Amino acid sequence: MAIAHRSNAQREGASAHRNEGIAFEHLLVGEEGTKDNFILTVVTTEDEYKTPRHRHNFEQIRYVLKGEMQYGPNHIQKEGTVAYFCEGVHYQQKGSDGSETLLLQFAGPSGQGYMSQRQLRAGAKELQSKGSFHDGVFVWGEGREGKRNQDGYEAVWEYVNGKEVRYCKPRYLAPVIMDPQSFDYVPMRGSDGVAEKSLGRFNERGAEIRMIRVGAGVDFVLKAPDRPLVVTVMSGEGGADGDIYGPLSAWRVLRGKETRLSAELETELFIVGLPAFDD
């Protein structure tokens, strides 16, 4: 297991398929081409950043660390809240100046996987020979049959994959926004000094969001019995499997594996159980 830290994260600006005013610090990436590929990144936006109304064939979880994000007139995500975006749900984005969001993107229950950032950026660059991007929309050049305007991400996905994207009917009709402060920690049975709060478990593949608090001086074994876990440290310091961690350190626990933590300071972990694709 390797622990990633924000201080050495890979940094990138906006991809060609979206507007400027957004930047990325990639903490963790999965395996390109696999059904359970994913990416964990810290996203910074400015006031100028916005997208058209769109949807995806993958899922997202967003934890706003600073500022706020707007996803439409009735969906504003405030600092300190967590949002789950199911596959196929429509939304748009409007940034706020200097907002920071912990963003996890991963495969939806339809099992179409998640296109890597490398594929996305290379595909967007190549696609510009066939048209141009404007305000998050790809405008096809002359000679294309059917509609000329297409969502930028959708156009890149179809170009990279060589087929038409398909969207499942959304299981939730809007982004689900949760306030972790409204949930209580419950002591974990058999683990003195450790408590847990469950924020939700979604769809038949079981994407799950929870938080764990480990007291100072406490040792704890975090297990991933039935699905991979993506773990982010929200606060605290300590060690995990011989490496050190601090705020916004992150790692993945593979299915059937475990991580041994020793908390020097009280530690709060944000944990997402990725969908299980047993078939």
Image: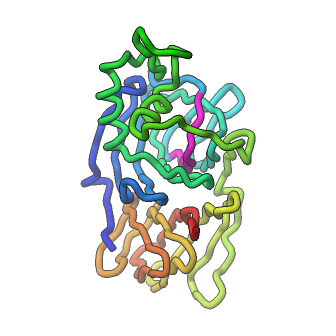
Residue ID at (28%, 52%): 9
* Rendered residue at 30%/36% (across/down): 122
Depth check, front residue: 41 or 63: 41
Give the residue at the far top of this rendering.
142
**Does residue 63 show up magenta in the picture?**
yes
| Left or right of residue 162: residue 147 | right
Q: Is residue 118 above or below residue 255?
A: above
Locate residue 95, reporting x and y percent: 50, 29
Regarding residue 98, the answer to whether it shows in the image is no
Residue plotted at (61% across, 65% down): 210
Which segment did they paint magenta? 54-64
- Residue 75 in view: yes
**In this rendering, position of residue 186 left or right of residue 117:** right
Which residue is more in the foreground, 50 or 158? 158
Query: In which quadrant is the C terminus drawn?
Result: bottom right
Across and down, in percent, residue 43 comes to 42, 41
* Observer-nearest of 142 and 268: 142
The image quarter containing residue 53 is top right
